[in-house]
Image: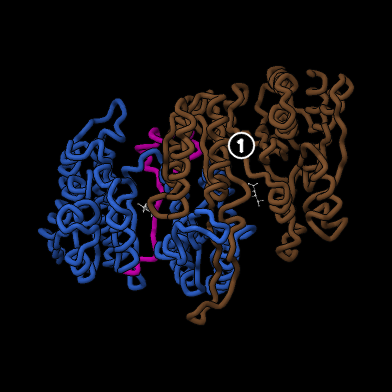
Chain colours: A blue, B brown
Amino acid sequence: MKIAILPGDGIGPEIVAQAVRVLDKLKADGLPVETVTVPLGGAAYDQYGEPYPDATRDAVRAADAILLGAVGGPQYDTLPRDKRPERGLLAIRKDLGLFGNLRPAMLYPELAGASTLKPEVVAGLDIMIVRELTGDIYFGQPRGIHVNADGEREGFNTMRYSESEIRRIAKVAFDIAMKRNKKLCSVDKANVLECTEFWKEIVIDVAKQYPEVELSHMYVDNAAMQLVRNPKQFDVIVTGNIFGDILSDEASMLTGSIGMLPSASLDANNKGLYEPCHGSAPDIAGKNLANPLATILSLAMMMRYTFAREDVAKRIEGAVQAVLKKGYRTADIYEPGTEKVSCSGMGDAVVAAL
Amino acid sequence: MKIAILPGDGIGPEIVAQAVRVLDKLKADGLPVETVTVPLGGAAYDQYGEPYPDATRDAVRAADAILLGAVGGPQYDTLPRDKRPERGLLAIRKDLGLFGNLRPAMLYPELAGASTLKPEVVAGLDIMIVRELTGDIYFGQPRGIHVNADGEREGFNTMRYSESEIRRIAKVAFDIAMKRNKKLCSVDKANVLECTEFWKEIVIDVAKQYPEVELSHMYVDNAAMQLVRNPKQFDVIVTGNIFGDILSDEASMLTGSIGMLPSASLDANNKGLYEPCHGSAPDIAGKNLANPLATILSLAMMMRYTFAREDVAKRIEGAVQAVLKKGYRTADIYEPGTEKVSCSGMGDAVVAAL
Ligand SMILES: CC(C)[C@H](C(=O)O)[C@@H](O)C(=O)O
Ligand SMILES: CC(C)[C@H](C(=O)O)[C@@H](O)C(=O)O
């Protein structure tokens, strides 16, 4: 198991450090783990002048899986566009062909109070959002800011999806639906955008190979409403890059504890980059306050999807559940009556529970 | 006051009928109202074979303001794209240059229980979303489904905003912020999309004319999260057509009573189309069950924005508040302890309260 570790920026290094302790424990117990640590984003810019430098590229290409903390910070906001931390993230996704982004939104019963939604609306919530990650308006050409034919300045981007791009992400989503409750909702804006009308057509075609999966279609505006109105109607959602960006963030916030949510970004061979859904939280960086659980749970996803070690995934997830049951909470999920711990304190608890 | 009435499809005719009764009452009290009724959407297709026929176009062009019910229904879903009801809506917006879409999301204290969010999160919610309505990826060229240079089929659309388009919607938003709490949040995805990077640049430039307004910027994914986490942080939000479509629907659902929310779509001279935020609800059409209040409140917006009759707007809004206080509720907002009324029963109550 060759794993590249990318601490990144902000709270990235401290949360990743706790996940590495978990890896070390698993290694001590016999898991064949080999790690290499390289920078991405602002940290890479500081060291190499590039958010995705050659050293990082070589290391992640050689790895089977990648664990990322988070990228970005205010000190990088004034850099030219192509040097900014986000560029490193977009570049690594594209370079490794990580087209399948899996973002679960699930509510831990112990943390139900953290949601801004009423308990009955979110209790038992367990949605998987499958977001296409290397196409769409994120990467579509042409794009830019120019003077148009009327002599006026304008900004423009191109939303674009080819048949093969849609087909492969649809398959990922149907496969996941088969392992869950066999309900898949494809989100589009087919009433307005030809690109997503085409998306819908191809998804319907792929569905023929999955007769057991109940496929539905929803417009993106309605999906944004339904996630608030009745999120438990969803099992698996599949959508394009930009709609997935918006809806997966909305869905993760329904749980009220985004500090708990991992994600996976997979290529065609299940090589993957794993990272928490939350950002780099520069305001609390370096204070040993951050919640490392989403990063630790990202390791569990890595074991499940890249290494097909469901047993190890379950062991990690079981340890996280155990520390929640025991009442340990970092500041972001703290409630009166529980025990507040630091980032490393939470790492201690998980390693002990393992 | 030349008003074109477009009942549309589904519950459209029955909710508009109640709003027309309100208009009739105002006319009886001396308001110089003249109306003409024409079809749009599916109803227009049924009569003329087009969702936006010449007769409708001529009538709405000649009017000062337009009241629309809603368009769409399952019987039109299999029509060719250019005949579908939504096309009528997009065509009228573009034809009349209705670029400024105002969508308030506010919670009536009497209906606080209807929200899926906890009362303390949404009590007193009052957001105004200003959505650009005639540009962006909705109308951008080129677009279509074709075989690309690699010999593969693909769908594509173009997101596009010119400087003048951004400038005029930004002004609308700043003007509204000046009349409210002087806080404006511009939503973009400037970290990825050049089109919205340009949007942000122009909004910042327009802000110089409004030194009193506190301007902030937020990425669309974060905005989708913040609306769930803490919606009351927002006063006025301004954004493009597609992000506005998604966020305004999400925001309206925060109130739990989308049957209460009106909207306005304005041109450069405050000519406007007014319609409820909700759809045509084919499942309850013709049953006298629909909630006509969003349509009646759309009339209030018409009085305020097109006819500058704040007094009449307040009178209508006051009547709606009075019927809510008295406990009248249509099925969608009914709670035990209140009095359930039909669509026309609600119309009766509002006319009486006027
Ligand atoms: C940082 C940004 C480029 C990125 C995206 O939009 O994909 C982020 O929002 C995400 O969802 O991973
Ligand atoms: C029906 C559809 C074309 C329309 C839109 O996307 O603008 C609707 O969702 C709206 O928000 O008015």
Seen at 16% across and 58% down, the residue is A48
Report crowding for label 1: few under 14, some 14 to 19, many 20 or more residues within 10 A (C-alpha).
many
Q: Disc 1 marks which residue?
A: B103
Say above or below: B257 vs B110. Answer: below
Q: Which residues are magenta?
A: A96-124
Magenta span has A100? yes
Left or right, residue B333 beside residue A81: right
At 55% from the left and 50% from the top, the residue drawn is B242
Total labels drawn? 1
Residue B285 at least partly seen:
yes
Q: Is residue A331 magenta?
A: no
Left or right: where A212 falls relative to B49: left
User: Does any portion of residue A226 appear in the rendered image?
Assistant: no
Among all residues in the image, which is located at the extreme left?
A28
Q: Amino acid at mark 1?
A: Arg
Q: Position of residue B272 (x, y in %)?
A: 72, 38
Tell which subunit mark 1 falls on.
Answer: B
Residue drawn at point x = 21 percent, y = 63 percent: A53
Query: B105 or A271, which is in the foreground?
Result: B105
